[in-house]
Image (cartoon, rainbow, N blue to C red):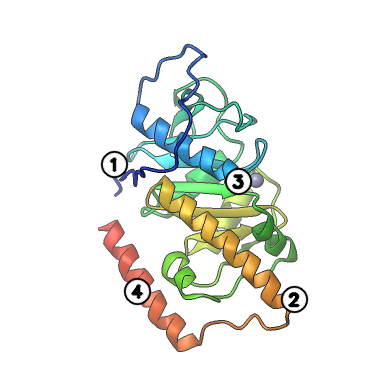
Amino acid sequence: MCNSVSTGSRSEPTIDTPNTDKGRPLTLRPEERKLLWEVVMELAREGLVAGSNGNASMRLDDDTLLITPTGSSYRALTPEDLLIIDMDGGPVEGEGIPSSETALHLAIYQARSDAGAVIHTHSPYATIAAVAALDIPPLVDEVVYKVGGSIPVADYAFPSTEELASNVVGALGEVNAVLLRNHGLVGLGRNPWDAFDLCQLVERLAHTFIYATLLGRANPIPPEYVDLEQELFRMKRRASIT
Ligand SMILES: [Zn+2]
């Protein structure tokens, strides 16, 4: 079981003081609200999400998670806008409607006890690979260590549906990232910054994959080294669960 999740806090990036003009005081979990908000702001700055697309969440304890609201522009988002919900999607604290992809987030937390945070992006290069329905092979070592191997493509389903959540969990297995066909990317991590780093890494890998494919030479790592790196990945994952 997963109890409180490490925050993985960073001294960077420098951020503006949150806008608390809405007059709603932070009540439950103010530190986690600020942490997830900082990660979401960095996702927007890095171009991994834009407008109001994409979404992010973090596990608070066995019974609750913190998640971004639906339809809210990142430009206007504040920590108070984030919503605490239970593992059935029911409201615990906050005004507004949870992310339209809440079912996807809940399904991943239920399937993966090592997931402390989940991020869904529409980042450009990952989306190109998702549109082409191409699994991204293990092209560079750090991806195998951090993602667990090839990045699979989940079968298409209409956004925000239970079918999409089911397809993603089915494709996920034990790796930490999945491409959503004709849609985008979802990645998980031990904490929000871990999930951020993973989504950024996958976006860079997708960029590499597409250019190497255009050159006609997207050569994967030799299989025996992939096996070795996957064993290291599994050891790390087991250590994070226990
Ligand atoms: Zn989406």
Residue lying farthest to the left in this orientation = 242
Q: Amino acid at mark 1?
A: Ser
Q: Nearer the viewer, residue 16 or 187?
A: 16
Q: Which mark is residue 232?
A: 4
Q: Tell me the CA gap for discs 1 and 4.
A: 25 Å
Evaluate if marks 3 and 1 touch, with contact meaning CB atoms under 8 Å apart.
no
Q: Tell me the CA gap for discs 2 and 3.
A: 35 Å
Give SS at disc 1.
loop
Give SS at disc 3.
helix
* Sequence-first disc among 3 and 4: 3
Q: Tell me the CA gap for discs 3 and 4.
A: 33 Å
Q: Tell me the CA gap for discs 1 and 2.
A: 45 Å
Vertical relation: 19 (above or below) 175: above
- In this figure, which residue is indicated by the disc labeled 1? 4
* Sequence-first disc among 1 and 2: 1
Q: Amino acid at mark 4?
A: Leu
